[in-house]
Amino acid sequence: QVQLVESGGGLVQPGGSLRLSCAASGFTFRTYSMNWYRQAPGKERRWIANIGSTNGVISLAESVKGRFTVSRDNYKNTVYLQMNALKPEDTAVYYCKADGLDYWGQGTQVTVSS
């Protein structure tokens, strides 16, 4: 079955960086666009990034544009979220999701605090 396993979260100081990973299985990864979402405490889950299946075209939410980028390795069935210049408002649980598939992983917690 479809599995998505996010990792790489943690506690980081403002201005720091983290790279999140999402290992996918149970579907033909290379044929799906992949997304990153995040959910801050008490708020709705929000989309933040997408990367195309084969063309690698990237879309980013305005709130992360210029600081975050997304990449993928279709051989490793993994999508990454590189987060730079982190701010306290980036604190959230981060999730990946394949376009068109209604499956979520457990998420990975990112906390930005001094």
Image: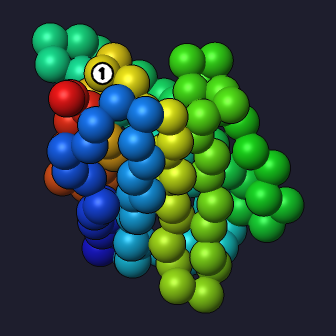
77 sits left or right of 105 in the view: right
Residue 86 in the image: above or below residue 74 = above
Residue type at the position of mark 1: Pro
Name above or below for residue 15 compared with residue 97: above
Q: Quadrant of residue 14?
A: top left
Residue farthest to the right, as pictured = 55
Where is residue 15? Give x, y as percent: 43, 34
Residue 42 appears at what percent x and percent y? 14, 12
Q: Is residue 9 left or right of residue 21?
A: left
Please rate how many residues cluster around mark 1, counting C-alpha atoms within 10 Å: few if below 14, some from 14 to 19, many from 20. some
How far across and down, in percent of the image, does residue 106 sit?
18, 52
Q: Is residue 110 visible?
A: no
* Residue that carries the numbered disc 1 in the rendered image: 88
Residue at the spot 71% in from the left edge and 36% down from the top edge: 59
Write the residue at 61% across / 52% down: 70
Q: Is residue 112 left or right of residue 60?
A: left
